[in-house]
Image: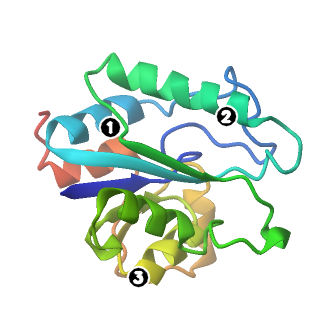
């Protein structure tokens, strides 16, 4: 199985320091849905691991989160693609859960769901905590500049060897050898 685990906010859709609280605020980054479809058509299984502390903060509820994910699935289906699994952490960092990135809980849950070693997965993210979660399970990691990506890169805390891409479409182009499967 070729598994790609994507962070959501800042990788697939526009991010906001004020949180994505409604379905209308969930806006795909240009090219991200088509990139996901290309990856899917090339034989990759797509999963999402996303911190969603806005639930614990009372900014939105699980039904709203589910509606955002339904919008994502609908847009991706229009391109003939699908997301096989979505894991989310509804907790605050002060809750000390095992799922909130940088902890690896969501990545472990996804790998267990598919019956694979998490080190076989590729993780694409825009933040230090995405890389930390990937590193904790031995998964390969790619950084995008979208979302919090530029800010993360400017902090200089990521290892220099991590591949960096402008966005998810750039990552997909590189992975697929610029073929549009």
Quadrant of the image containing the N terminus? bottom left
Residue at the far right: name it: 58
Quadrant of the image containing the C terminus? top left
Residue 91 horizontal side relative to residue 13, left or right: right
Q: Which residue is mark 3?
A: 160
Residue 50 horizontal side relative to residue 112, left or right: right
Q: Which residue is mark 1?
A: 36
Residue at image point 49% right, 55% down: 145
Q: Position of residue 172 (x, y in %)?
A: 26, 46
Q: Position of residue 9 (x, y in %)?
A: 59, 45
Mark closer to the observer (3, 1): 1
Q: Which residue is mark 2?
A: 65
The residues bearing labels 1 and 2 have C-alpha atoms spaced at a distance of: 20 Å
Q: Earlier in the sequence, mark 3 or mark 1?
A: 1
Which residue occupies the foreground of this view, 79 or 47?
47
Q: Earlier in the sequence, mark 1 or mark 2?
A: 1
Q: Residues within 10 Å of mark 1 (few under 14, many from 20)?
A: many
């Amino acid at each position: 199985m070729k598994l790609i685990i994507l962070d959501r906010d800042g990788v697939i859709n526009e991010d906001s320091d004020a949180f994505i609280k409604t379905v209308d605020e969930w806006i795909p980054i240009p090219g991200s849905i088509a990139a996901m479809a290309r990856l899917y058509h090339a034989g990759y299984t797509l999963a999402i691991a996303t911190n969603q502390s806005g639930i614990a903060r009372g900014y939105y509820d699980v039904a709203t989160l589910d509606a955002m994910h339904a919008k994502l699935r609908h847009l991706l289906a229009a391109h003939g693609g699908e997301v096989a699994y979505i894991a989310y952490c509804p907790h605050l960092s002060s809750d000390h859960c095992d799922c909130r990135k940088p902890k690896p809980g969501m990545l472990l849950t996804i790998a267990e769901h598919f019956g694979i070693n998490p080190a076989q997965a590729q993780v694409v993210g825009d933040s230090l905590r995405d890389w930390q979660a990937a590193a904790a399970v031995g998964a390969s990691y790619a950084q995008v500049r979208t979302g919090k990506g530029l800010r993360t890169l400017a902090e200089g805390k990521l290892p220099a060897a991590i591949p960096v891409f402008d966005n998810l479409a750039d990552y997909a182009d590189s992975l697929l050898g610029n073929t549009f499967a």
